[in-house]
Image (cartoon, grey):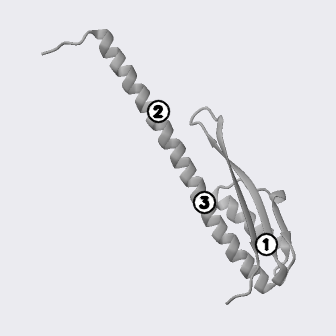
């Protein structure tokens, strides 16, 4: 049976610890990216729905903006009032929206990646 000296044992533990940290970092970033992308997909579907509803019911732009901001807050997306551009009313209703989401390093709160999302939704006649 082979015996390992204490220095080799420490080195193996250090390598194992390093791999565990790299794995944690990778899965954290992957999870954060998937979470943000999934939230944006749901937000995009909601935008499509709200533009069609507001266009059909001729809702005022202020009400549409409020509904959009409430949904963004519910999904944890950093959308502000000035990022929501609404033009037209009724059948000419259009919403343009651009926002960034920061993916941060866990524990350090340093931005590693900034994901940009853009939505341009126009009212269209129901089929």
Q: Earlier in the sequence, mark 3 or mark 2?
A: 2
Q: Report whether 28 appears left or right of 48.
A: left
Instruction: Rate crowding at label 2 as few (under 14), some (14 to 19) or many (20 or more) other CA atoms within 10 Å.
Output: few
Q: Distance from label 2 to label 1 (Cα)? A: 44 Å
User: Where residue 39 is drawn, which disc sits there?
Assistant: 3
Rendered residue at 83%/64% (across/down): 85
Residue 13 at what x, y percent from top left? Answer: 35, 21
- Quarter of the image with the N terminus in it: top left
Circles 3 and 2: CB distance less than 8 Å?
no
Relative to 7, does residue 119 appear above or below in the rendering?
A: below
Secondary structure at numbered mark 2: helix
Location of residue 91 (image quadrant): bottom right
Q: Work out whether 76 lies above or below 88.
A: above
- Which residue is drawn at the image coordinates 39% and 23% (left, top)? 15
| The disc label shown at residue 22, or none | 2
Crowding at dot 3, Cα within 10 Å, few <14 / some 14-19 / many 20+, comes out as: some
């Amino acid at each position: 049976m082979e015996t390992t000296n204490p220095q080799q044992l420490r080195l193996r533990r250090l390598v194992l610890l390093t791999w565990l940290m790299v794995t944690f970092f990778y899965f954290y970033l992957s999870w954060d990216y998937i979470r943000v992308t999934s939230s944006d997909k749901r937000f995009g579907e909601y935008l499509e729905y709200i533009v069609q509803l507001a266009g059909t019911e001729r809702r005022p732009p202020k009400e549409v903006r409020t509904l959009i901001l409430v949904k963004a807050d519910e999904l944890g997306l950093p959308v502000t009032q000035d990022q929501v551009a609404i033009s037209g009313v009724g059948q000419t209703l259009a919403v343009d929206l651009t926002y960034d989401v920061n993916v941060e390093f866990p524990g350090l709160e340093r931005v590693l990646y900034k994901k940009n999302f853009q939505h341009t939704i126009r009212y269209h006649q129901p089929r």
